[in-house]
Image (cartoon, helix red, strand yellow):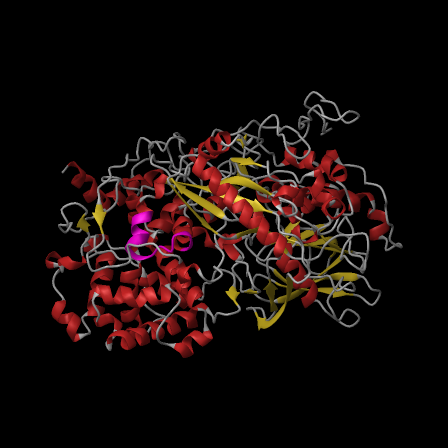
């Protein structure tokens, strides 16, 4: 069993702790179809695949012999050596896993190709790695994530009288939207200690940091991946390299119950936005 | 189901076995155990000189980044006994750097800083380096010069402050550094003081094509293929660019300049020592009002002292003020070099909004250097716009993680929306606004109560936009969005952000309102120099890397020409003329080459000099 499979199983184990979830739990083959993305025209569920996205057959990992040794080591370690949970408590890890599954839903991926997110967030917090700064209206990242989970649970209780992890995806999405909108209906004491908007961005960026660092995600979006020492030959007109794949689009829609496939400005566009943090130019 | 075969291939261990097979085009073997490699070819001369624990050296440089790297090389070659300290590693790029976005986190200054104000800045990956080469390791490499008007914005526009020097004082150093870096760009660069470049422009990527298309549709001139600090042809023992797009993750190729590859090898060769992974805790003062050296934590966390006749602080806009403030002592209760109270004040960042456009046809913006085309057509003040100063428009090329974070803000994306827009990653192109934010006294660096892992108080930064800044950003952002639309984008969104850091220990002629003179020598302490982005009084809307290096080369020439006075502790001199330019101190490989000057549009200035205006004698 690969570590990745163990990860996938681990996350399901976590969910089985709740009775309600346990009753819903089925093998991956019999997955609840309400969680699947659907064909945009027929509205029929699309079966989970090894590789969602518009570049079928494209594999960055298949190119690893062209990568330099240092890069190959780092990327393969990321794929094969998923770090253990050491920062979050069991209960927090369960809740955080459920949150990660909504922030970066992967129900269109088969179990062998789900990308571990929780474990990398846990690893960052456990090792105390930060991005080099903290806003004056924020506690340290470690505390922010713990407080955020408490707030998410409080909102779920307030809106639905139930724990977040027992809710269906539409209710879970609704809970998260209240934070995205910067109008959380519960957890006032927590929001005294940290900015709603900055917490939301912290949460989402930690999830995308893990997801888009993974070669499976590169295959999904058609990114070339590590490119030293080979480099690129075709720079213009979006042309693929000989080893890349051209795009083959298909029309899909989010699962009918999910509501995150919609774009709205964070905080309704009313508040001063946190500045972008990545270097660009 | 032809696809299934491939899907299977990337899902099991077969590829690991494949990795063992000999590569067709070859990953390099990597560095040999006894070698320190920079890129695939460049080997650092080892072992490097080591000074003894009780040695007093001539010069200590704190921070071997854009400025510190140039200074270290100049001083070593001029015969000084010089030690450079850096809080981060002395990179062996073949072993330490990766062609991977997440794996490059270690290149940034990730230690805690507290950020506040009405418009707080982001640090870390956004603008702060750690390790030898500093921020130049992860800059995108745009190297435009400042315009002549940048040096006198108070005189011309009644805003900010004038520099104590003019463009003409710095021009020879721009030309010199464009050779040493070297810079690739067009033969005719039309803005500011028009000039050409030593290396030809780079080929264009999809983002540059979009910028040209958009600008051309709106009749806006645009510069293609540079100016960038990226080799378009091989130079000495550095190979040319391979267009892999990982510039801001550290250039494993060695094609993009950092001082690590352009100046540090020559510094080591000439007897400089670099003490990596050493955090300088304070600058020490003697009873005579002169600095005596630095106290630092060595790589094992042991507190040590290094005595020096001269100390250069080159820690950039946050760490330089922080070290001066943390070095407060009897007689200097407000921090060193701070009798004016100006240390930490007038901090600037440039408006760096990223404008993203989705195109029907794929772009694949991860290919080619993110920096490869720009326009400075909006750089100068235009009274009709209703604000002072201006902005540039440049290509950017975010990789997937950076792009996802931009979409998180620009579209509010998360969940399935994030997955969807990311599946379209290859259809997006990015332009960067680079807008001048003016120096304001309330934008500043102070010390927080919190301490870092060494027990040193961390920096607290306050930053707020003022009226002119807001107007400029609003206008500039809309202009860039207009260009993106004109390029054919169907959807245009933007993310607000800031790029670069400038100020915090500014230069000036008046000791009451500035920290150092134009050579970086502190007004208060004759043998304490500052040299990095913190000493620039204003920032223009040009990426500051080239100017920081040019100012450093000028500072080095000053100290070298004044060495007797400074080292002998004679009464300080205040030269009113520029020091002789030491072309002979250029690193090997830059010698004997020049930057073409262009025939001026105004009479009585330089005429074209056949491509060798900077005649180097080496």
- Residue at the extreme left of the image, as rendered: A30
Q: Residue at x 20, y 74 (%)?
A: A17
Query: Residue A187: x and y, percent?
Result: 37, 76
Q: Using the image as rendered, state which of residue B561 and residue A51 is in the foreground.
A: A51
- Left or right: B357 in relation to B543: left
Q: Is residue B73 visible?
A: yes
Vertical placement of residue A123 versus B74, above or below: below
Q: Quadrant of residue A117?
A: bottom left
Quadrant occupied by the N terminus of chain B: top left
Q: Using the image as rendered, state which of residue A220 and residue B489 is in the foreground.
A: B489
Q: What are the residue bounds of the magenta stretch?
A: B409-421
Q: Quadrant of residue B269?
A: top right
> Magenta segment: does it hold A166?
no
- Residue at the extreme front of the image, as rendered: B384
> Magenta segment: does it hold B417?
yes
Vertical placement of residue B486 versus A80, above or below: above
């Amino acid at each position: 069993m690969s570590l990745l499979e163990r990860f996938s199983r681990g996350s399901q184990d976590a969910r089985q702790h709740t009775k309600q979830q346990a009753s819903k739990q089925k093998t991956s083959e019999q997955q609840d179809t309400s969680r699947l993305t659907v064909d945009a025209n027929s509205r029929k569920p699309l079966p989970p695949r090894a590789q969602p996205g518009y570049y079928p057959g494209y594999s960055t990992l298949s190119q690893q012999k062209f990568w330099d040794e240092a890069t190959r080591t780092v990327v393969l370690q990321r794929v094969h050596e998923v770090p253990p949970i050491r920062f979050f408590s069991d209960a927090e890890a369960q809740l955080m896993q459920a949150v990660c599954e909504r922030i970066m839903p992967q129900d269109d991926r088969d179990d062998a190709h789900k990308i571990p997110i929780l474990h990398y967030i846990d690893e960052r917090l456990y090792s105390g790695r930060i991005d080099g700064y903290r806003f004056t209206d924020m506690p340290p990242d470690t505390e922010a994530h713990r407080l955020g989970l408490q707030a998410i649970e409080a909102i779920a209780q307030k809106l639905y009288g139930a724990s977040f992890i027992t809710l269906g995806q539409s209710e879970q999405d609704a809970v998260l939207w209240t934070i995205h909108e910067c109008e959380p209906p519960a957890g006032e004491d927590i929001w005294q200690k940290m900015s709603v908007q900055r917490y939301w961005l912290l949460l989402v960026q930690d999830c995308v940091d893990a997801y888009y660092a993974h070669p499976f995600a590169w295959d999904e979006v058609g990114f070339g991946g590590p490119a030293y020492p080979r480099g690129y030959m075709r720079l213009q007109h979006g042309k693929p390299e000989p080893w890349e794949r051209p795009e083959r689009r298909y029309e899909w829609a989010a699962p009918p119950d999910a509501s995150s496939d919609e774009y709205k400005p964070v905080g309704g566009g009313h508040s001063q936005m946190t500045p972008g943090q990545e270097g660009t130019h | 189901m032809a696809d299934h075969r491939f899907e299977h291939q990337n899902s099991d261990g077969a590829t690991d076995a494949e990795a063992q097979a000999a590569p067709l085009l070859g990953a390099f073997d990597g560095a040999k155990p006894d070698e320190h490699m920079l890129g695939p070819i460049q080997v650092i001369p080892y072992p490097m000189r080591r000074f003894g624990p009780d040695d007093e050296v001539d010069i200590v440089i704190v921070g071997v980044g854009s400025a510190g790297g140039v200074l270290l090389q100049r001083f070593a070659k001029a015969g000084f006994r010089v030690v450079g300290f850096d809080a981060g590693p002395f990179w062996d790029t073949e072993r330490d750097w990766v062609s991977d976005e997440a794996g490059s986190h270690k290149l940034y200054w990730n230690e805690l800083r507290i950020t506040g104000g009405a418009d707080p800045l982001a640090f870390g990956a956004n603008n702060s380096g750690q390790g030898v080469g500093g921020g130049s390791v992860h800059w995108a490499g745009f190297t435009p010069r400042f315009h002549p008007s940048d040096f006198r914005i108070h005189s011309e526009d009644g805003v900010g402050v004038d520099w104590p020097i003019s463009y003409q004082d710095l021009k020879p150093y721009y030309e010199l550094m464009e050779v040493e870096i070297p810079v690739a760009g067009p033969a005719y660069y039309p803005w500011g003081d028009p000039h050409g470049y030593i290396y030809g422009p780079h080929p264009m990527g999809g983002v540059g094509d979009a910028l040209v298309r958009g600008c051309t549709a709106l009749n806006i001139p645009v510069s293609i293929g540079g100016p960038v600090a990226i080799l378009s042809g091989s130079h000495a023992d550095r190979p040319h660019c391979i267009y892999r797009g990982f510039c801001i993750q550290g250039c494993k190729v060695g094609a993009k300049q950092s001082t690590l590859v352009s100046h540090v090898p020559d510094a080591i060769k000439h007897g400089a020592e670099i003490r990596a992974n050493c955090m300088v805790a304070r600058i020490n003062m003697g009873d005579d009002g002169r600095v005596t050296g630095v106290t630092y934590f060595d790589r094992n966390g042991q507190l040590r002292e290094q005595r020096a006749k001269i100390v250069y602080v080159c820690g950039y806009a946050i760490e330089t003020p922080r070290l001066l403030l943390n070095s407060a002592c009897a007689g200097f209760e407000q921090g060193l070099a701070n009798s004016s109270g100006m240390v930490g004040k007038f901090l600037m960042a440039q408006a760096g909004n990223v404008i993203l456009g989705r195109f029907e046809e794929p772009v694949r913006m991860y290919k080619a250097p993110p920096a490869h085309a720009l326009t400075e057509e909006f750089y100068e003040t235009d009274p009709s716009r209703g604000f002072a100063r201006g902005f540039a428009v440049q290509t950017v090329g975010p990789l997937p993680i950076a792009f996802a974070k931009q979409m998180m803000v620009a579209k509010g994306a998360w969940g399935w929306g994030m997955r969807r827009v990311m599946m379209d990653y290859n259809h997006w192109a990015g332009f960067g606004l680079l807008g001048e934010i003016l120096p304001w006294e309330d934008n500043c660096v102070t010390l927080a109560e919190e301490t870092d892992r060494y027990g040193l108080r961390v920096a607290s930064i306050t930053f707020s936009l003022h009226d002119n800044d807001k107007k400029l950003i609003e206008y500039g952002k809309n202009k860039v969005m207009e260009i993106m639309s004109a390029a054919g984008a169907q959807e245009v969104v933007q993310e607000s952000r800031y790029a670069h850091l400038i100020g915090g220990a500014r230069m000036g002629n008046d000791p009451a309102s500035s920290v150092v003179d134009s050579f970086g020598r502190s007004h208060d302490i004759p043998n304490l120099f500052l040299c990095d982005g913190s000493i620039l009084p204003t920032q223009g809307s040009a990426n500051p890397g080239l100017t920081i290096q040019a100012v450093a080369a000028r500072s080095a020439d000053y100290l070298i020409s004044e060495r007797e006075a400074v080292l002998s502790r004679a009464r300080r001199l205040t030269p009113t003329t520029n020091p002789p330019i030491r072309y002979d101190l250029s690193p090997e490989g830059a010698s004997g080459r020049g930057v073409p000057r262009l025939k001026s549009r105004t009479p009585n200035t330089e005429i074209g000099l056949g491509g060798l205006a900077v005649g180097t004698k080496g």
